[in-house]
Image: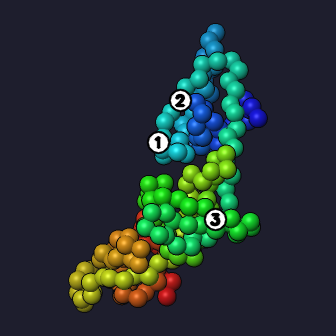
Amino acid sequence: MTINFSDLSRGLFIELDGQPWEVMGYERHKMQQRAPVTRIKMKNLLSGAVVERTFQQYSTGFTVADVDGRPTQYLYNDGNFYYFMDQETFEQYDLTKEILGDALEYLKELAMVEVVLYNGTPISIKLPTHVELEVTETPPAFRGDTAQGGNKPATLETGLRVNVPMFITPGTIIRVDTRTGEYTERVS
């Protein structure tokens, strides 16, 4: 399906040069007696690279990419692959460590995530905004350490390191924002 500039929106998946891209932002400039210029900021779904491209045509057409998000559950890894099961069809997808990248720091067994498919092939995962992880290691807090509360480093069950408030102890479950990698609140 081909769309024009007026159909663009943030979060839309388009295909350029045989690769899928996610539109992060766009604008169109028209100067007097010149052709309009379309500037799109987009993210490559295969490599993760963010680029800004300019198109100088009166009728710029874009092809919508065949990208689908499937609700899945992370099952296990065997050292080489990480396995996810589709919650509707019970089909299993295997992804490598290279494809998952930094998402591994937020991923624990039985977690619900969305696998992104391009032409039926899994290319990445989309994490929920917040995940709940257990603190496995953090130094003890001493009374009088700070005047304003303060923070200390903590290691979570997935190996992720975040700064937490002084009252957090090992065994505490905390909520972490997957977009920023920061502590948001104590769950239990």
Say if residue 151 shows up in the picture.
Answer: no
Distance CA(mark 3)–CA(mark 2): 36 Å
As helix, strand or loop, the secondary structure at mark 1 comes to loop
Tag 2: Cα neighbours inside 10 Å, few (<14), some, or many (≥20)? few
Q: What residue type is labelled 3?
A: Gln
Q: Residue 49 carries which label?
A: 1
Numbered disc in front, either 2 or 1: 1
Q: What residue type is labelled 1?
A: Ala
Numbered disc in front, either 3 or 1: 3
Side of 126 relative to 77 (left or right): right
Contact, mark 3 vs mark 1 (Cβ under 8 Å): no
As displayed, is residue 166 above or below residue 66? below
Q: Residue 155 carries which label?
A: none
Q: Which amino acid does label 2 sit on?
A: Arg
**In the image, farthest residue toward the right:** 1
Distance CA(mark 2)–CA(mark 1): 12 Å
Contact, mark 2 vs mark 1 (Cβ under 8 Å): no
As helix, strand or loop, the secondary structure at mark 3 comes to strand
Q: Earlier in the sequence, mark 3 or mark 2?
A: 2
